[in-house]
Amino acid sequence: MSYDETITLTTAQAIIRWLSNQFIEIDGEEMRLCGGGFGIFGHGNVTCLGEALNQFRAELPLYRGQNEQSMGFAAAGYAKQWLRQRFMFCTASAGPGTANLLTAAGLAHANRLPMLMLCGDTFITRLPDPVLQQMENFNDPTFGVNDAFKPVSRYWDRICHPAQIIQSLPAAIATMLDPADCGPAFIGLPQDVQGWTYDYPVKFFERKVHRIRRQSPDADEISEAASALSAAVRPMIIAGGGVQYSRAVEELTAFAEAHNIPVVETIAGRANMLATHPLNVGPIGVTGSNSANALAEKADLILAVGTRLQDFTTGSWTAFAKDAQIVSINAARHDAGKHMSLPVVGDAKLSLRALTGALDYRAPADWVAFAQEERRKWDAYVADNVSYGNRPNSYAQAIGVVNALCDPRDRIVAAAGGLPAEVTANWRTLDIGTVDVEFGFSCMGYEIAGAWGARIAQAEREPSQDTITFCGDGSYMMLNSDIYSSVLSGKKMIVLILDNGGFAVINKLQNNTGNDSFNNLLKDCPTIPVPFAVDFTAHAAAMGAAAEKVSNPTELGDAFKRAKASDKTYVIVMDVDPYQGWTAEGHAWWEVGTPHVTESENVRRAHEEWESSRNKQRRGV
């Protein structure tokens, strides 16, 4: 093929043609890098980008969204299920359609997830300005709504000429596939530029097979880490989400077994190890376990693998001894150096292999025995916590019912509110990589939309398995329309709606800091004279799902079996107590802002009690 051969295409046509020819090799199999997209059309993307997408509807299936924010959540759920090896695009119109994607971009950015946003923009010529939905900036005509995505995008561009995509598209893909810089990419597409033509080199559209880079660790950093580990008396490993994204679960397990080091998991790292593994001590941190947090308090060395060490993991940096040494393995330099860690900048799989090769060490048997005894105590607590009898209905009970009846390879999804903490603490991992607790950006509304995206991905590899999502009534009311999306697309989900009458977990925080209940539970809202209970079963049924309400965990188990047997999206509703049944143990300290001056004696006492743990906080950067 001659390098001079060209083809005349619009900008939009060239973007979609190029995207359809990007592939990735996964486990020896080549498949399209982009699994398709989620779209809502408006005047900013329907005429040109819509025309281009219609031509490639078989190669890049377009799922019709109901809300742009939920489209972004679905794209994030898809990327997580594929371990960041594949992504979906989202296309939205200019103005509010695109602005609705901002929260989803924040979620993808915080969680380091690839997502491509192809969004309408105002006319580059400015000849018709101001136009419908244009946000005018009087002092900078180049500044608009799409510029708001710069803080929440790893890559951002506005295409001002058709030729620019020859540079911009490969750069966006490179960013989304970079383990150290992974995250959302935003490309603004002015409405006139979308339809402009250019003579593109035919070679630009040749099939391209991508492979995700694995960065080898520096030999000196491995040597320094090995020296630190060799001197440890009470070491532990924190396994984060990066372990799964690196496909390093086997290496993590082998490393822990070879050196007899106990392992704790972050929220994103849940399902790095089976619950029954003798070195798995449980989840760590604010929503963790007594076992993992007891270990963290005594550890003299923490090997952090693939974790960004956010405050829910570190207990706002009170979970560890102040003099404990942290060694951090991470592909991202920014994460590897946090809190004066000894950094090992590199891929988790390669770094663990290199570190075990440099290490002749096994942790003392009494340290491991202590960890395992703490885990036995925690297991006994969880077994009691999820049990039911003469107790009010709780999140934990519902989690226990599903845990006992689901298939080991079913996908479990939760986000925001009280359920991430309850799932993290009480779920016993049945198989590797089966849990998605979105607590990086803590987005209410991710539960159903993210599960829909996960189900689309799951159907591509494990179609016989179910995607099961736990959703509170508050999150359901915030974003539920992808029940309808799942029905329309034939992507079955099982949705458990656990109704506690409002935003109960924030009410709990409000009460725990000495404040009176206010504006969280429906009954505590002064502007609601008569609280009204939503008929969630009728609402879900109106969107085409099968739905039923149960009264207790026993009935929930029977309904869950019916949901498993169903061939379409199934919604189960159960009321839970807003005050009782919360997991009461396993919590590390968490820094929240409490009033330093107040007229309330309860708030003052709670502030003093809360601040009493601050002396345990590590100082660092």
Image (spheres, grey):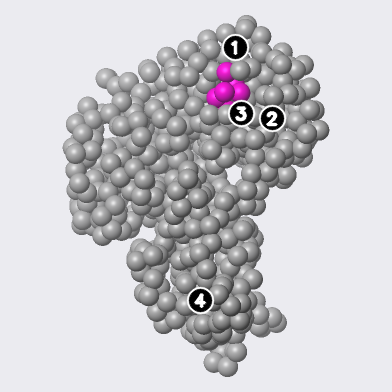
In this view, the residue in front, 371 or 118, is 118
Q: Residue at x 56, y 34 (%)?
A: 248
Circle nearer the N terminus (3, 4): 4
Where is residue 194 drawn, in percent x and y?
Answer: 51, 81
Count of numbered labels shown in the rendering = 4
Mark in the foreground, 3 or 4: 4
Q: Is residue 290 something one can see in this rendering?
A: no
How far is the residue under mark 2 from the one under mark 3? 18 Å
Q: Which mark is residue 14?
A: 4
Q: Residue 446 placed where, x, y %?
A: 43, 50
Drawn side of residue 595 relative to residue 490, left or right: right
Position of residue 510 in the picture relative to residue 606 (left or right): left
Q: Is residue 34 above or below residue 129?
A: above
Q: Are marks 4 and 2 in contact (CB under 8 Å)?
A: no
Residues at circles 1 and 2 in contact by the CB criterion of under 8 Å: no
Identify which amino acid the numbered label 1 is placed on: Val
Q: Which mark is residue 238?
A: 3
Distance between the Cα atoms at labels 4 and 2?
A: 43 Å
Q: CA distance from mark 1 to mark 2?
A: 23 Å
